[in-house]
Amino acid sequence: MRILLIEDEPLLGEAVATHLKKIHAVDWLQSLDAGCSAMRAVNYDLLLLDLNLPDGYGIDLLRSVRGSGQKLPVIVITARDQIRDRIDGLNAGADDYVLKPFDLDELTARIHSVQRRAVALPNPRQSIGSITVDQIARKVWRGDQEIPLTAREWAILECFTHRLGTIVSKAKLEEVLYDFGSEIESNAVEVYVSRLRKKLGSDSISTMRGLGYRMDR
Amino acid sequence: MTLFAVLWIGGVTITGFAIYHELDEIFDSALRETTGQIIPIALQEYRLKSSGQTVAALPAAVATSFQSRRGHVHYFLQDSNGAILVQSKGADAGLLPDPPTNGFRNYGEFRYYMRFLPSERVWIVVAQELHERSEATLSLWLGLASPLLAFLPLAGFAVWRTVGSATAPIRRVSRELEVRGGDHLEPIDDTGLPGELAPVISAVNTLLTRLKAALDQERAFAANAAHELRNPIASARAQVQLARQQARGHGRPRESREYRLAARAVWTPHRKDAADVARRRRPWSLA
C-alpha cells in the first residue's frame, strides 16, 4: 500500500514514516503544497494528514479531495483535541481521526482498518483459492503450510488482495515497490510477480498482456 | 383605562346627585301644587261633614289630576290637636307624623307636605309615596350608568388588545431569553422591538458578541496550547517507540539518535502560529 504522509513536525514525521515503511511504501511531505503536487502525480492508497501545516489548514485539502470525488481513504492525525475539531474533521470527509500523541502500532491498526473498509473487506483474513491471507498478522498459508514472504513480495500480494478480480497495472505495482529501494529495476515487477507465483502457485496471478496482472477470487 | 373609568364614575355620581336633588325639588313643587288643588276640595268636604251632609266623591277631573302627579297622593285635615277631620279614601291615619309642622318632611314610606290653614284653623297634610321618587331616581341612575356599563367591557377589550400587541415583541424576547442555553451567545433578534427597548437589546447584543469573542479566544488559546504541548509529546513518544522497536530488532539497547531527538523534541518550543495558519487558509486544487 502506498501512503502519503503530510506532517510538518520533523521528528514525528520521521518516526511515523520509518515505522510505516517497514510494511508500506510511504511518501512523507511537510507542506500542503508538496502534498498536493504528490497527489497529482501518484495514485495513493491512503493519506495521513496533519491539520496545522505551515502553508495552510489540512481540512481545506481534505475538502478539496472530497470535492474532487476521490475516494482516497484519509486519516487525520492532529493535536487539535476539541470536540468541534473532531466533528469538523470527520464531517469534512476524514475516515478516521487520530489524536496526538498516538501509539505507532495503533496508527498502523487504524490504517489497516480504514483500508479494509475502503476495499470492502471487513474480515482481515481472506481465503483466495487455495491460499489464506491474514492482513493483520501479514502471513500467508497455502493449505496448512505457512509461506514466508519478503516485504516487497507482501506489498505486491497486498496490492492484489485489495483488488481481487481486477487488473492491476504494472505502474501501480511499481508504485507499491517504489519506496522499498532507491532504485527500481525495470523488470522489478516481473521479478516479484514471478516469485509470488512460485510460492503461491503458478495460476495464482494471471498476466493480462499489455494491461497488467490479475489475481482472481 | 382605570383612571378614565374612575373619572367617568365620579362624573356620573356628581351629575346623578345633582339631578336627584333637582328631581326632589320638582317632586316637592308638584306636591305643593297638588296640595293647593286639594285644599278647596278637602275644605268643602270638611264643611259638608260639619253641617251633617253627605260627602260626595271627588270630582273626576280632580282624581285625574292626582293620577297625573305620578303616584298616589293622600290627604288629611287635622285640627290643632291632631284630630283627623277629613281624610282621602284609602289613607292610613296611623302613618301620620305627629305633630304636624309647616313644610316638607319624610316619614315612613311617604313624603309629607303640611300647611296650616289659618282661615279654618286646621292643618292640611298631603302624603306622597316615596317609592315613586325612588323609581325615578333608579331610572336616572340606570340611564347615566348604562353607557358606562356597555363601554367598560369594550374599552377593556380594546386596552387588552392594544397592550397585548404592544408588548408582544417584549414577550418574544423574554421567551427567547428563557429558552436560551448557557452556550447560546448569538445576538437577540431585535426586529419589531419598541423604540424604548431597542437600545437595551442592542447593548445586550453587543455584550453577547464581546462575550462570544472572548470565549472563542479562550477556547482557541486552550486548543492552541494543547496543540503546542501535544506535538512535542507525540514526537517524543513516536521516536521512543521507534527506538525501542529498533533496539529490539538489533538485540541490544542503545543510546540512539532517536532518543536524543526525542528528548530535544520535548524541550523545543513550537513556534507555529495558529493564527497565521488560519489566515493562510485557502482551497487546494487537485486538478
Image (spheres, coloured by chain):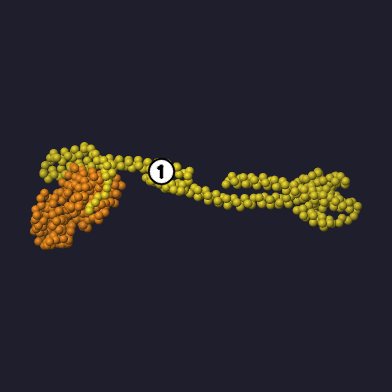
Residue A36 place in picture, x, y as percent? 21, 50
Q: From this viewpoint, is residue B117 visible?
A: yes
Report whether A25 appears left or right of A56: left
Question: Residue A131 is drawn in which quadrant?
Answer: bottom left
Q: Is residue B94 visible?
A: no
Q: How many marks?
A: 1
| Residue shown at 21% from the left, 54% from the top | A115
Picture residue at 20% right of the left edge, 39% below the top? B265
Q: Secondary structure at mark 1?
A: helix
Q: What chain is tagged by disc 1? A: B
- Which x, y percent locates residue B9? 63, 46
Where does the image place residue A211, in percent across and percent down from the top left?
14, 61
Res B185 quadrant in image: top left
Residue furthest out toward the right: B51
Q: Which residue is mark 1?
A: B205
Q: Nearer the viewer, residue A184 or B24?
A: A184
Q: Nearer the viewer, residue B119 or A68?
A: A68
Frontmost residue, B56 versus A131: B56
Question: Which quarter of the figure is the C terminus of chain A placed in?
Answer: bottom left
Image point 75% across, 47% down: which residue? B25
Image height check: is A191 above or below B13?
below
On the rendered structure, is A47 left or right of B94? left
Name the kind of residue labelled 1 in the image. Asn
Q: Is residue B222 above or below residue A71?
A: above
Residue depicted at 15% across the width and 45% down the height = B245
- The chain letter of the orange chain reads A
Q: Is residue B110 left or right of residue A3?
A: right
Residue A201, image quadrant: bottom left
Chain yellow in the figure, letter: B
Q: Residues within 10 Å of mark 1 (few under 14, many from 20)?
A: some
